[in-house]
């Protein structure tokens, strides 16, 4: 633009001094315009959170790739993270019951993505609640309701999402107020999610009676399950639930490993700082890890790790996992709070014990 003005002025016989003054003014204007554009369009952060109230979701993007979403649809009984996607782009959470699928188990419709709840809160079952529960039986179940998105912070090193939820009884009474911060990180072949959850008892004492069903759970895709020869019900090629007498274990190679070196389904009902569910899909080695935290109630947590794809940390079910040798029955008095901290790691590579021990210690500092 400035060069075009210079040519026209020069051709019209205007003095060089006048031309210089006009050109200086032109350049100053161009700088101001560039500065304004820079202020209006700042460089986007590497880890972005995209909120969509109409879809009731917040998408987590790392370097432009979808990692997970915080979703709070009306057809499930708690907000969840769904799906989980590895750095190399592989979805590792079960699609059922949210999406059509082929070759997936159709058990436990309440196992959706990544969730946090419990099986006995003042006598109410928050864990097993779903739309599959008969209407006549729903007075025994609790619901976790999304209330608000309180803060979104994007960044190059990490991004955070603050949300508020209510743990609600069938009569509408709020038993617990939940304030959760999700922290998302990721670089190279390792992504992670910190779930920092503060629970506050509202108008009465809240008892978390020792129960097998809890607390931080993930339901994985078929390839992360342990091979099994037990019959089951799976979606067929048309997505229809069909009983299968003999399972096809081709590509099914999940294997749990805990911090003490215990493997497979033997990790169930064991205490440990962390458990790593390892698998391979195609050429991609996958590590799906949950880290406990030394500050958590019930540390070190027991693990509710099942070969059929349920991967959960349960610090409050001690009477069940210890065959009655221990008992916790954790309580919060009216107005009292507790905070649970967990880190989920999703890696497109094998993570070894030394690496995970170090990550656990750093997370617990």
Image (cartoon, rainbow, N blue to C red):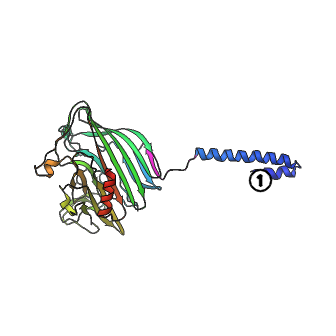
Up-down relation of residue 102 to residue 298 (above or below): below
* Residue that badge 1 annotates: 3
**Residue 299 percent location from the top left of the image:** 23, 49
Front one among 305 and 137: 305
* Left or right of 25 on screen, residue 134: left
**Residue 137 percent location from the top left of the image:** 18, 40
Residue occupying the far right of the picture? 13
Front one among 68 and 47: 47
Residue occupying the far top of the picture? 203
Examine the image and state in which quarter residue 256 appears.
bottom left
Front one among 161 and 142: 161
Q: Let me know if residue 107 appears in the view.
A: yes
Residues in magenta, as a range:
41-54
Rate crowding at label 1 as few (under 14), some (14 to 19) or many (20 or more) other CA atoms within 10 Å: few
**Residue 321 percent location from the top left of the image:** 15, 52
Q: Is residue 52 magenta?
A: yes
* Left or right of 300 on screen, residue 9: right
**Residue 150 percent location from the top left of the image:** 40, 38
Q: Let me know if residue 99 appears in the view.
A: no
Q: Is residue 334 magenta?
A: no
Give the secondary structure at mark 1. helix
Examine the image and state in which quarter residue 290 appears.
bottom left
């Amino acid at each position: 633009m400035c060069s075009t003005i210079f040519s026209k002025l020069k051709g019209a016989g205007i003095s060089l001094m006048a031309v210089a003054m006009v050109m200086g003014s032109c350049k100053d204007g161009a700088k101001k315009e560039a500065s304004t554009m820079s202020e209006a369009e700042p460089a986007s952060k590497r880890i972005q959170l995209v909120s969509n109230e109409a879809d009731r979701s917040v998408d987590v993007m790392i370097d432009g790739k979808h990692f997970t979403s915080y979703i709070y649809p009306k057809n499930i009984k708690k907000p969840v993270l769904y799906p989980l996607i590895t750095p190399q782009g592989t979805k590792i959470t079960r699609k059922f019951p949210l999406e059509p699928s082929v070759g997936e188990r159709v058990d436990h419709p309440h196992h959706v993505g990544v969730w946090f709840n419990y099986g006995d809160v003042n006598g109410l079952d928050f864990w097993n609640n779903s739309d599959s529960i008969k209407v006549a039986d729903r007075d025994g179940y609790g619901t976790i309701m999304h209330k608000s998105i309180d803060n979104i912070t994007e960044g190059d090193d990490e991004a955070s999402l603050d949300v508020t939820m209510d743990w609600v009884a069938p009569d509408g009474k709020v038993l617990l107020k939940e304030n959760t911060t999700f922290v998302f990180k990721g670089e190279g072949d390792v992504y992670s999610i910190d779930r920092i959850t503060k629970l506050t008892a509202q108008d009465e004492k809240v008892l978390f009676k020792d129960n097998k069903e809890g607390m931080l759970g993930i339901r994985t895709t078929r390839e992360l399950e342990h091979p099994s020869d037990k019959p089951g019900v799976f979606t067929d090629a048309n997505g229809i639930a069909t009983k299968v007498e003999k399972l096809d274990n081709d590509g099914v190679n999940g294997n749990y490993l805990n911090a003490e070196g215990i493997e497979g389904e033997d990790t169930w009902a064991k205490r440990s700082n962390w458990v790593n569910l390892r698998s391979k899909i195609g050429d991609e080695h996958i590590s799906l890890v949950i880290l406990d935290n030394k500050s958590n109630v019930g540390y070190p947590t027991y693990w509710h790790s099942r070969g059929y794809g349920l991967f959960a940390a349960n610090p409050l079910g001690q009477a069940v996992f210890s065959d009655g040798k221990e008992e916790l029955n954790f309580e919060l008095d009216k107005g009292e709070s507790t905070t649970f901290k967990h880190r989920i790691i999703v890696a497109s590579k094998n993570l070894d014990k030394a690496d995970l021990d170090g990550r656990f210690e750093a997370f617990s500092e």
